[in-house]
Amino acid sequence: MHEDDEYDDQDKLLERLAGVDDDLAEIRASALRDSLNEYDLDDEDAALLAGIEVGEDGISYAPALPVLAIVGRPNVGKSALVNRILGRREAVVEDTPGVTRDRVTYKAEWNERRFSLVDTGGWEPDAKGIDASVAAQAEVAIDLSDAVLFVVDAKVGATATDEHVVRLLRKTKKPVFLVANKIDDARQEPEAAALWNLGLGEPHPVSAIHGRGVADLLDAVMKKLPTVSAVAKQEIGGPRRVAILGRPNVGKSSLLNKAAGEERVVVNELAGTTRDPVDEIVELGGKLWTLVDTAGIRRRVHLQQGADFYASLRTSAALEKSEVAVVVLDVTQPISVQDLNIIDLVLESGRALVLAYNKWDLLDDDRRRYLEREIEQDLAHVAWAPRVNISARTGRHLDKLVPALEQALESWDTRVPTGKFNAFITELVAEHPHPVRGGKQPRILFGTQAATRPPTFVLFTTGFLDPGYRRFITRRLREIWGFEGTPIVVNMRVRERRQR
């Protein structure tokens, strides 16, 4: 039995909601809102609730976060620094150099400034091509970031490999911070001072493991880091921005070429031959769209091991720039872990999603049966994403992409009025109350949509809601308002009654 089934039955929620008059819904929501005054609310709650009263207009779209990249030789402590900045053990720290990870970009925050942190520690070169690889890694980081942290092991001092990186960093116009790591106490500070001669300005002595000096470093970084990323610039208005994602050789470039109506991207049988992302304004379905291409993996011969890292970094950068992602899947191949990782990145970025099943013209009946089973099993969590079966090579059904994109973006922008949302919650809970857990039954006091892009709902509750119950709420939201093609976020704020 599916874990959410305890909440399932076909009730008449839609009919009952249709019978709730808008004015009545607003009056009821307002009464629920007033009842929150009996609970302990913090400043953030107050701001959220004040915002609701100001009006139901669309919420502004968060601009792309500035990007801070961390580079350096293996074993200088890059991952420890990532963990320290994030304040949690996200990046895997192991003694073996070269422990790769799926994640490259993390969301971080310092003094109420949010930014993306790029960890290059997941791509550690072997000793053979170390100079070239670390330099290439730095080049990638400089390309795709707004500022760079260059980490050196102060106990070892600058090595020949470090010198390679220094030459690149000196050329960039972007802010570079020289981090002298492994300075555990004041007695070792002269070791950091010795790094002045690299010509990258003042060394920042830190101990990533103990946290010493990291706050000062971040304070200095925030003074130079732009508030909006220059790399993933945000154009307000203009054609909607579409990222075309997928693993190598699924047909991203062919799709881009067909859409652009000409050979814009070099397509080659070799996986990863496309080089740089090309933003193209194209006309599809009588409308202009900006296509953010991400096929660019700068595959040099000695960079085989860095290619996946680079691809994943490109994907993250493209998602920051886009509003909707088209994930291209090759139907002639089984759905892979890599495909699922790309879909997870889209969900995590909160962008709208369309699934394009490519090479449909090459499908035989046997493979089709297996494919449908794979979709049912592996992609059940994105069953809400519009699905388009296409052939990028022949151009078949490309016209169906436009309605799917429009629908996903419309859902992404959808706002549910507070009155209607609370009527929905009230009716839902009356029909399916939250199960009693440990003798207590959490109540939902009031709910509101805090943001669009993606639709984000906040529920004020008296206790923690089961994940299964939250999924149930999300599923019913979809049944009533559609939300096809957009993730939905449901957050809780558990609040206690004021002490008299």
Image: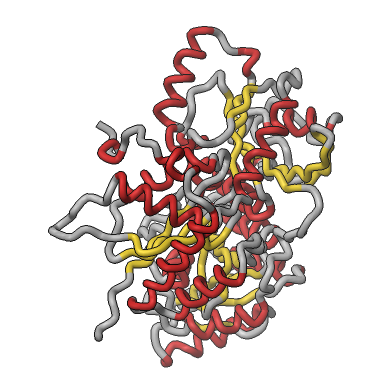
Whether 428 is drawn above or below 227: the answer is above
Q: Quadrant of residue 158?
A: bottom right
Q: Position of residue 83 (x, y in %)?
A: 42, 67
Horizontal arrangement in the rendering, residue 83 relative to residue 387 (left or right): left
Q: Nearer the viewer, residue 35 or 175?
A: 35
Q: Is residue 293 visible?
A: yes
Quarter of the picture containing the C terminus is bottom left
Whether 12 is drawn above or below 370: the answer is below
Q: Position of residue 329 (x, y in %)?
A: 58, 29
Horizontal arrangement in the rendering, residue 487 relative to residue 94 (left or right): right
Name the residue at 35% across, 64% down: 445
Q: Position of residue 284 (x, y in %)?
A: 80, 34
Q: Quadrant of residue 140?
A: bottom right
Whether 431 is drawn above or below 75: the answer is above
Structure colour scheme = secondary structure
Residue lying farthest to the top in this orientation: 365
Q: Position of residue 323 (x, y in %)?
A: 66, 49
Q: Nearer the viewer, residue 92 or 409?
A: 409
Name the residue at 50% across, 13% down: 367
Residue lying farthest to the right in this orientation: 262
Horizontal arrangement in the rendering, residue 2 relative to residue 154 (left or right): left
Q: Is residue 77 visible?
A: no
Name the residue at 75% across, 43% down: 291
Q: Quadrant of residue 288?
A: top right
Residue lying farthest to the left in this orientation: 439
Q: Nearer the viewer, residue 273 or 494?
A: 494
Q: Nearer the viewer, residue 122 or 219?
A: 219
Quarter of the picture containing the N terminus is top left
Name the residue at 42% across, 20% down: 373
